[in-house]
Image: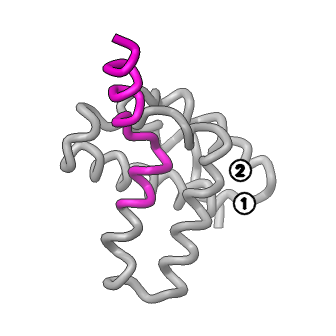
Amino acid sequence: MARRKADRVATVETFRTVTDEFLAQRQGAWARNHYDKVKARLEWLYPFIGDRPVSAVQASELLGPLRAIEAAGKGETAARTRLVAGQVFRYAIAAGKAQHTIRPSPCAVPWRP
């Protein structure tokens, strides 16, 4: 019984592992500078949702870190982070690692260049 539970825990796809897979697939197609920027944006989210199962993350969990990025005076980074996080969640659905996507309202994190 304990082994089956350990096997289930080992197969849980976290936001971080799905993000790594997403980035690995795109690394060859993207310019190195773009890849580095996208990776850095996603790393802003790791302390908040990085170890959470990607299928269990709720929109409200994403909104907090995005607001923190915005409060640091990085409004454009917050907006772009929201967009790329959406790409990761859509990838997770396509790969069968999540059942639904989460999308904080675009109005929640306005773009302020």
User: Which region is colored magenta?
Assistant: 1-21
Q: Residue 67's spot in the image, x, y percent?
A: 68, 41
What residue does disc 2 label? 70
Circle 2 SS class: helix
Query: On the picture, is 26 further left or further right than 67?
Result: left
Query: On the picture, is 74 further left or further right than 96?
Result: right
Q: Residue 36's spot in the image, x, y percent?
A: 56, 77
Query: On the picture, is 1 further left or further right than 45?
Result: left
Quadrant including the C terminus: bottom right
Q: Is residue 1 above or below residue 34?
A: above
What residue does disc 1 label? 74
Kindly check if marks 2 and 1 are in contact, taking CB atoms under 8 A apart as contact.
Answer: yes
Prevailing secondary structure class for the magenta stretch in the rendered image:
helix
How many residues crowd around disc 2 within 10 Å: few (fewer than 14), some, or many (20 or more)?
some
Say which quarter of the image contains residue 65: top right
Q: Residue at x 29, y 46 (%)?
A: 92
Circle 1 SS class: loop
Asked whether 63 or 6 is in front, the reply is 6
